[in-house]
Image (spheres, coloured by chain):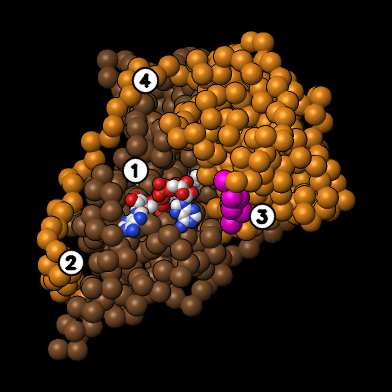
Chain colours: A orange, B brown
Amino acid sequence: MNILVLLDTTFLRQIINEPDEHALEQALLLKEASGATVTVIGAGVDGMEDVLFTAAAKGADREIKLTGDFEAGMNNHARARAFAAMMGELAPDLILTGVQAHNDIDGALGPLVAQYIDLPYIGYISGVSITNGECTVRKEYAGGLIGEMQAPLPIVLGIQAAEKPPRYVAVSKVRQAMKTVTLDEHPTPELDPSGAADIERMFQPEGGEHAEMIEGDLDQIADRFVELLRDAGVL
Amino acid sequence: MSADIYVLIEHMQGKVNDISYIMLAAGRVLAGGSGGQVVGMLLGHDVEGLTANLAADKVLLVDHPSLAEFTPEAYQKAMAALIEQSAPRTVLMGETSIGADIAGGLSALLGLPLVSLCRHVGAEGGRLTFTSQICGGKILAEGELPGPTCLLTIMPGDYKVEQGQSSTQPAIEKVPAPDLEDLRVSLKEYIEPTAGDVDIARESVLVAVGRGIQQEMNIEIPQELADALGAAVCASRPVVDQGWMDTSRLVGKSGKHVSPKVYLAIGISGAPEHVEGIGGSDLILAINTDPKAPIFDIAKYGTSTDLLDIVPVLTEKIKAAKGG
Ligand SMILES: Cc1cc2nc3c(=O)[nH]c(=O)nc-3n(C[C@H](O)[C@H](O)[C@H](O)COP(=O)(O)OP(=O)(O)OC[C@H]3O[C@@H](n4cnc5c(N)ncnc54)[C@H](O)[C@@H]3O)c2cc1C
Ligand SMILES: Nc1ncnc2c1ncn2[C@@H]1O[C@H](COP(=O)(O)O)[C@@H](O)[C@H]1O
């Protein structure tokens, strides 16, 4: 089975973003359970190489870096089209991606990729099992309700949480991967970002009224908290 | 093309989800600017009863056995047909396990622009605008909703459920379902959340633990505080995902909505998905080393001291206060 994991970096911090980390973990768990090949793929922005080497150190089998002008005018529609263009060649049985985008406001990557290659998509997933070419997933709804859904492979899944917490990998192992692993570089000729709205202004939220900050030494702060709890009638 | 604002009425297990009312409230704002109607889109099977209190001018009802339960594939097909038929000005879906599953597919399928993570909409001088969050709510992005038709996924926050409710029954228009044969995705069953030993939604004092706790070993520190207070512990998502606390204790978008007298947030940053679950609290207190953490924007009182230092001291003081 070929599992493909689509990876992104976080905004300003060049590390893997949290839902993607869970997507990778879920892929590695499936590999351990059933002997799949895990390929990770990321669009070449600052920090992406580190993300791909980290994935390699954790146990991914192949790392692909899409090169192109991904820094400028990048959004999930553009990224999804670039990934979709690779799918024929990679022929994945299962495509995993983090459920939510962090930096872009044109929707998550998974459903876009799925539609571009005409596969079904299910998101908010916190558990995946594969038997006889069919996947059974646990889809999360508000309040902790789970919908167990079934679909034949291939499919695109948006991962909310892997079945286990993402594994830790020592920095020394990532460094080793940087020396021994070669990234597959694939040029992406033209990026098409259409499908998003123009952003006219970015700003920091004003927030409501800021909390009254309690100052002093530990004793004084704790005393004030006790007072507040008493005033609230819970002590 | 029309000036109408379409709103997907999300529902589960015979109940309209709160996000639907929130979207109707946002939809009313947009319709005020576009000059169109607010039109609900209700997909399901035998669900006409759900229309009673929707603050919509009209509800399009698509009834089909394959829509009895949400599956992204069937919903997307039915939605695509509705949108193509009437090309509304804007289509609102939830930034939820339902809306976010289909919005991207609709955007790609119909070639329509999509604005996600939208917290606020505006309508001034004929301009329809969005405000969406980037970076977990640390940054907001604002712009105009592109025309002629734009898809939007809405997060809760700025609109109240009551604003999307009405005592007048909206008009109902039955629309035939499109071809829903050969579906690939099916729902096998629902699994109800495990009850857990306590129901945090009913507790009057909650000690909430976030990633600031750093390691599993440390969980006993807020636990002792909770014991001293006679409170229950609960947690943010990363703590539950690490397996340090049971899922039944999760607070927020994918967990429970709580309404205690006091919510004491410890090592929690205050991400929108968490904050969504604590709005019903009478008093929020926060302990977080980062004085700029968004939790302090909703807490009444706070301290930017290290939880490992302050919590044990607080526990002792509470024990003393109770004993004395
Ligand atoms: C679809 C979706 C659904 C989600 N549903 C939920 C949900 O239901 N509930 C939920 O909680 N999250 C949910 N999330 C995740 C959410 O976006 C945040 O990632 C999460 O709430 C962050 O948890 P946190 O505040 O504990 O961790 P962080 O954001 O990492 O914050 C940790 C905080 O601890 C502080 N800190 C660190 N060390 C100390 C110390 N020693 N003393 C005091 N403070 C310290 C830091 O300053 C920081 O502010 C969801 C996300 C998605 C995409
Ligand atoms: N207790 C923890 N367990 C696992 N990972 C953590 C923990 N605390 C912080 N992290 C990770 O360390 C990174 C930096 O944390 P922060 O600066 O607190 O957001 C985050 O991406 C977290 O994933």
Instruction: Name the residue carrying label 2.
Output: A218
Residue numbers of the magenta segment: A165-171
Q: Chain under label 4?
A: B
Q: Tell me where residue B175 sits by quadrant.
A: top right
To which residue does mark 4 refer? B143
Tell me if B219 is positioned left or right of A28 in this view.
left
Q: Amino acid at mark 4?
A: Gly
Image mark 3: chain = A
Kindly indicate whether the residue at mark 3 contacts the one at mark 1 (C-beta within 8 angstroms). Answer: no
Would the CB of label 4 be found within 8 Å of ligand 1?
no
Circles 3 and 4 on the same chain: no
**Disc 2 is attached to a residue of which chain?**
A
- The crowding category of the residue bearing disc 4, from other C-alpha atoms within 10 Å (few below 14, some 14 to 19, many at least 20), is many
What secondary structure is found at the residue carrying circle 1? loop
Q: What is the CA distance from the residue labelled 2 to the residue labelled 1?
A: 34 Å
User: Is residue B260 shown left or right of residue B197?
Assistant: left
Tell me the CA gap for discs 2 and 3: 43 Å
CA gap, disc 1 to disc 3?
29 Å
| Residue A219 image position (x, y, % from top left) | 15, 70
Of marks 2 and 1, the one in the foreground: 2
Q: Which mark is residue A127?
A: 3
| Picture disc at residue B157 | 1
Q: Residue at image x 37%, y 38%?
A: B137
Q: Single out the residue that lies furthest toward the right.
A: A132
Q: Amino acid at mark 3?
A: Gly
Which is nearer the N-term, disc 1 or disc 4? 4
Front residue (pair B44, B137):
B137
